[in-house]
Amino acid sequence: MVYQPAKKITTSILFITGLLALLISSACDDTDRLVKAGWNKPTHINPIYVMTSDLNERSLQVVKDGVIKAQEYLGNYGPLKVFIIGTDLEAANVVAKEFCEWTYEGKGRIDECFYEDQGIEIRELAKYKSGSAYAETDGRHLSIPTRAVTIGNPPYDDPNDIGGYKVAIHEYTHIYQHAHISDEDDGMPNWLEEGSAELLAMFLAGKYEDYLNDSVKLARQLRENHPGLTIKDLENERSSEKLQRDCQECYWRLQSETGSLATVLLINQTSMDYFFKEYIPSIFYLGKEKAFLNAFGLTIDEFYIKFEEFLNLSESDQFEMLEPTKLTN
């Protein structure tokens, strides 16, 4: 038997307790700072659009139309800059520099962004003629918090394609979601963040029913080919990154179509308005678990069980449960 002095144990407990208190105090201070800055409230400041010089007015307009459509439903959150990237590398470099200066403070952090982080991603959008897009809220840490959306090469090939328009709605939805997250580690599960953004984008773009039909079929196909996969595999960044490394197609299907179906089941317990305008704003103050339980009457883990039961139904029974959703209270 080894004797452990009580004094050492007491000292360790006091240290851990003090550290936890410091972390909680820091999180509360950051939440207060964001509230004072109006992070989770609409603003009168309109978005600023920054486009590489090789793109034309049509590329700008299709993105603007998508952002405006999303704002009409979700409200205007900012300050926001929307960066639109074409295929000219030199022009992309100019925009990448502005992105980094908009999102970070201090020469060291701005240079890191430009040479090692998002600057590389922006140049790759041009280099590979990519249509990828992402929302960025790292600017939340600035004294005057900022947000950014980056979209590559809209409006895509087909003049009748909703791609660039839909993508702009999707990414703006992420801006709205993160406006209502005070702690990035206590926000929405990844499957719900992505699934609800894609669902709303398709809804506002007028493609909801087609998307729902396709989602059921693709989710069933994914389940058949990868029976062990569940939306819990997209619970957080760590599990999501692992799945993306192991099976990239599974990752995209699971977060988009399967995640959207899970979102529809939650919305059908309430309404589209309640989900986006009541549940999501409550996350800022309640956190991920409490906001979910308060909105839907069950825990996230309990919902996983319910959703697995849904996925095991026949296709006709699944469609029966996915009633048409309207923007009503």
Image: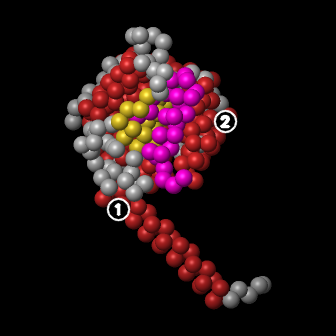
Placement of 298 over or under 307, stated as above or below: below
Mark 2: give few (<14), some (14-19) or many (20+) Cα within 10 Å.
few
Please give the name of the residue rendered at 48% of the width and 45% of the height, measured from the top-left corner: 101
Please give the name of the residue rendered at 42% of the width and 14% of the height, measured from the top-left corner: 161
The outermost residue toward the top is: 159
Horizontal and vertical percent position of residue 124: 60, 30
164 or 13: nearer the eye?
A: 164
User: What residue sits right under mark 2 in the picture?
Assistant: 245
Q: Please, what is the dominant secondary structure of the magenta stretch?
A: helix
User: What residue sits right under mark 1 in the picture?
Assistant: 32
Placement of 111 over or under 35, stated as above or below: above
Count of marks overlaid on the render: 2
205 or 33: nearer the eye?
A: 33
Horizontal and vertical percent position of residue 243: 62, 37
Horizontal and vertical percent position of residue 80: 37, 40
Query: Can you say which quadrant of the picture contains the N terminus?
Result: bottom right
Distance of mark 2 from mark 1, alpha carbons?
37 Å
